[in-house]
Image (cartoon, coloured by chain):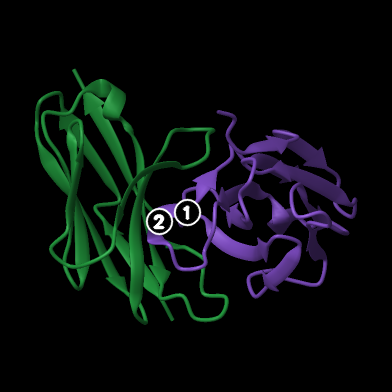
Amino acid sequence: GAGVSQSPRYKVAKRGQDVALRCDPISGHVSLFWYQQALGQGPEFLTYFQNEAQLDKSGLPSDRFFAERPEGSVSTLKIQRTQQEDSAVYLCASSFDTSGDTVTDTQYFGPGTRLTVL
Amino acid sequence: EDQVTQSPEALRLQEGESSSLNCSYTVSGLRGLFWYRQDPGKGPEFLFTLYSAGEEKEKERLKATLTKKESFLHITAPKPEDSATYLCAVQASLTGTASKLTFGTGTRLQVTL
């Protein structure tokens, strides 16, 4: 079946521009996560949705970062007034349910969007 | 704060030369420990989840084990196609919104002929 998809795969932005990154989770997956991965590092948590509710946004680095999932499926991560330090790969992951069933709690990742801010 | 430390940072093996990757962790109640494989330019690919000390899981040439403080990923008779970065992550017990994964920095494995 189809996995998690992300678009665009690559984005180059001039410093100060706004960008929007899209994530299509696996169909039927309740939970959606955004992570940021710097070169040579492991992914770092940004934010988490359960259906359309954003339950945790503790990892968002500044108020320039905003995420939404209005209908509980597709999600968009928006970065306003991009800075060079925002350059990274942005990964989206989805899982079926995190209500307590460990079998369905596995997070499946998309290919990522590589953002380069010049 | 949950922490994950992976070692070594990089490992070069010859084809057929078995070895182990280490993942040490501290977490406020472990819900699960996850191993992922990541190829260059791609997202992490799920390998295993371990839930309790003593648990072991195997897939082809890979075997993951778990203790109360660390996990090992054993690679038996590796092949060049096993070359990748292997990421370890922990998930704390589900309290409120504690569903996120905390990752280590990974071990870059290169297997040569």
* Residue A7, percent from left and from top: 74, 36
**Distance of label 1 from label 2 (alpha carbons):** 5 Å
Q: Give the left or right position of residue A32, taking residue B100 as reference.
A: right
Which residue was labeled with disc 1? Answer: A41
Which residue was labeled with disc 2? Answer: B105
Q: Are marks 1 and 2 in contact (CB under 8 Å)?
A: yes
- Could you say which disc has been placed on residue A99 in the image? none
Give the image quarter of residue A49. bottom right
Q: Is residue B9 above or below residue B58?
A: below
- What subunit carries mark 2? B
Residue B81 visible within the image: yes
Q: What is the quadrant of the C terminus of chain B in the image? A: top left
Q: What is the quadrant of the N terminus of chain B in the image? A: bottom left
- The amino acid sitting under disc 2 is Thr
Secondary element type, mark 1: loop
Comparing A42 with A109, the one in front is: A109
Q: Is residue B87 above or below residue B32?
A: above
Q: Give the left or right position of residue B91, taking residue B55 as reference.
A: right
* Residue A53, percent from left and from top: 74, 67
> Which hue belongs to chain A?
purple
- What subunit carries mark 1? A
Give the image quarter of residue A70. bottom right
Comparing B111 with B92, the one in front is: B92
Q: Residue at x 46, y 57 (%)?
A: A105
Q: Residue at x 21, y 35 (%)?
A: B12
Q: Residues within 10 Å of mark 1 (few under 14, many from 20)?
A: few
> Which hue belongs to chain B?
green
